[in-house]
Amino acid sequence: MATTIIEPFRIKSVEPLRFTTKDQRAGILAEAFYNPFMIRADDVLIDLLTDSGTSAMSSRQWAAMMEGDESYAGSKSFYRFEAAVKKITGMKNIIPTHQGRASEKILFTITGGPGKYFLSNTLFDTTRANIEFSGAEGIDLLTEEARHPAAIAPFKGNIDLVALEETIREKGAARIAMCIITITNNSGGGQPVSMENIRAAGRICKQYGILFFIDACRFAENCYFIKQREEGYAAKTVGEIAGELFSYADGCTMSAKKDAFANIGGFLALNDDDLTRECRNLLVITEGFPTYGGLAGRDLEAIAVGLEEIMDEHYLQYRIRSMEYIGEKLEVEGIPFIKPVGGHAVYLDAKAFLPQVPSHQYPGLSLSNALYMEGGIRSVEIGSLMFGKYAEDGSLVPAPMELVRLAIPRRVYTQSHIDYVAEIIIDVFKKRDELNGYTIVYEAPLLRHFTAKLKPVQVEAREG
Ligand SMILES: *Cc1c(COP(=O)(O)O)cnc(C)c1O
């Protein structure tokens, strides 16, 4: 019997890849000041910078785009989109937005503000930024097991329920704007959250009269993990699991650039009519009329179809299996990564991979650049370059972990691309003793990782 889990699609339209030589890549990297964000996409062979907005759309989605109704008000594309979102979330009111952070901005402008707290398993960076921009504070309450990259556990994305209740008591329920759980937990390694955890968090919030929201960007991947790993869900469909999951929440925010196979778009779904009215009032000022919210009718069509397609269990099986497959290849070689692999990305543990490179010389960047040099693969450093801060004496306060994320775009690369990626990681691992760190020559005051300029550290300097 055949056991290979195949790509559950065939290819109708292709984009050629552009190959470069190692010599060319050395020049490209120097011109980009050793910052992968500054490399032109055309100079990248396999681009694993993000899974956001990089999905391949299906022929059904492209066909639906031709059906886009561009009427300013009440377009039929909106009603299709609304029905698709309602079918999955069961929420009463659906508000389209141009992407996830627009939903966050609207919701947190109304519910946030100075003196308020947002509690989460882990807030994604745009989520945290929008909370802080409102004047409120975000608090991550991750469980102990999630803090250990090599510890195997089925639901490392769970919120710490004891800490949740303690924090509510300590701050006072009236000052908690909401609890928002990110599924899967993107910043925590794409790790899933269990149904039990969501149910219990929902119950605690209800008991204290606190709003309970889901950051639903990767809801389908999370539901598939529940089906695979949580007792009592193996026989349920992903649609049924999603229905139960959302039934515990008062609302959700969503980026359609993730689990909706769209290149742009998002939404806010909620039950409370008063809160909805306030959100819609703000939407009209910042995004657009309530039946298009910053999107073209054709985008709403693509999202409606994408939401249906993302629930296909053959797709989800292939998706989750592709991540495991990379993990298995790395495990055999003893390469350090966050275990188990998450739903949308593999996170290499650069601190363990390159113990000779200290945090202030950015081991994650060193590894990321080595993957580009060796095989034209682009990844992203999630470590002290992205999250490091400076102490008063000017020394670097390193990030808790030095990671390199390889995010896999949906339906874009085939198994041989993935085999190639694993081979390049293994090649770099064999040469890891030769790799050195970097120092910053320019940085912006905020979100410095996007535009920082760096230069390689000379070996003498490292030892001296
Ligand atoms: C991508 C993402 C967002 C923000 O969505 P955008 O569409 O990029 O604005 C919010 N939360 C999580 C968990 C995400 O992955």
Image (cartoon, rainbow, N blue to C red):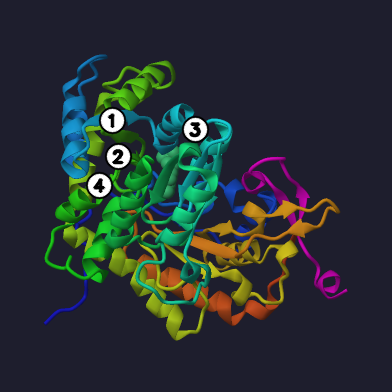
**Percent position (x, y) of residue 33?**
70, 51
Reading the image, the residue beneath label 2 is: 250
The label number, if any, that marks residue 272 in the structure image: 1
For disc 2, the neighbor class at 10 Å (few under 14, some 14 to 19, many from 20) is many
Residue closer to the observer: 341 or 111: 111
Q: Which mark is residue 284?
A: none
At horizontal 78% and vertical 65% (from top left) the residue drawn is 457
| Quadrant of the snapshot with the N terminus | bottom left
Horizontal and vertical percent position of residue 249:
29, 44
- List the residue tagged with mark 3: 112
Amino acid at dot 4: Phe
Residue 246, numbered circle: 4
Q: Secondary structure at mark 3?
A: loop
443 left or right, relative to 415: right
Please provide percent x and percent y for residue 134: 55, 31
Q: Quadrant of the C terminus?
A: bottom right
